[in-house]
Image: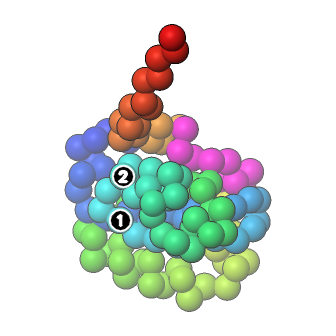
Amino acid sequence: MRDNASMAQGGWLYIMANRYRGGMYVGVTADPIQRVYQHREGTGSQHVRDFGKHRLVYVEHHATIEGAIAREKLVKKWRREWKFGLIEADNPEWQDLWEQWFATHAPPEKPSPVSSTG
């Protein structure tokens, strides 16, 4: 688990997928908790929402946001097989990393309306 202080610095490359070896979305952010939460809630990228890429399968930290952006540009140019290799080196089953990395730090959900009967 990463601590909030280390997440607040630098930049993060991340990959979202819709299933094992399925469609992928490569992104970069300074705030992985907020960004992945947005994707999972359907308020992030329209592409992620439209193609159901809600599974966080890869996360990579960089000391600077500029380093993360440079890495994102590079990885986006890679062949699918190379991206598969990157993901599977750390996450061979393509498990959703949200629960083990960020779930306890998720932004609070909006309260549901209270209904009263009768």
Label 2 residue SS: helix
Residue 106 seen in the figure: yes
Q: Residue furthest top?
A: 118
> Which numbered marker is on residue 34?
2
Give the image quarter of residue 108. Answer: top left
The magenta region covers 90-99
Q: Which residue has dot 1 on it?
A: 29
**Residue occupying image coordinates x 30% and y 50%:** 7
**Residue occupying image coordinates x 53% and y 38%:** 100
> Which numbered marker is on residue 70?
none
Q: Residue furthest bottom?
A: 77
Residue 87 seen in the figure: no
**Residue occupying image coordinates x 32% and y 56%:** 31
Label 1 residue SS: strand
- Badge 1: residue crowd in 10 Å (few <14, some 14–19, many ≥20): some
Q: Residue furthest front?
A: 118
Task: Name the main secondary structure of what is drawn in magenta.
Answer: loop
Question: Residue 21 in the image: x percent, y percent?
Answer: 76, 66
Separation of disc 1 and disc 2 at Cα? Answer: 9 Å
Is label 1 in contact with label 2 (beta carbons under 8 Å)?
Answer: yes
Kind of residue sitting beneath label 2: Gln
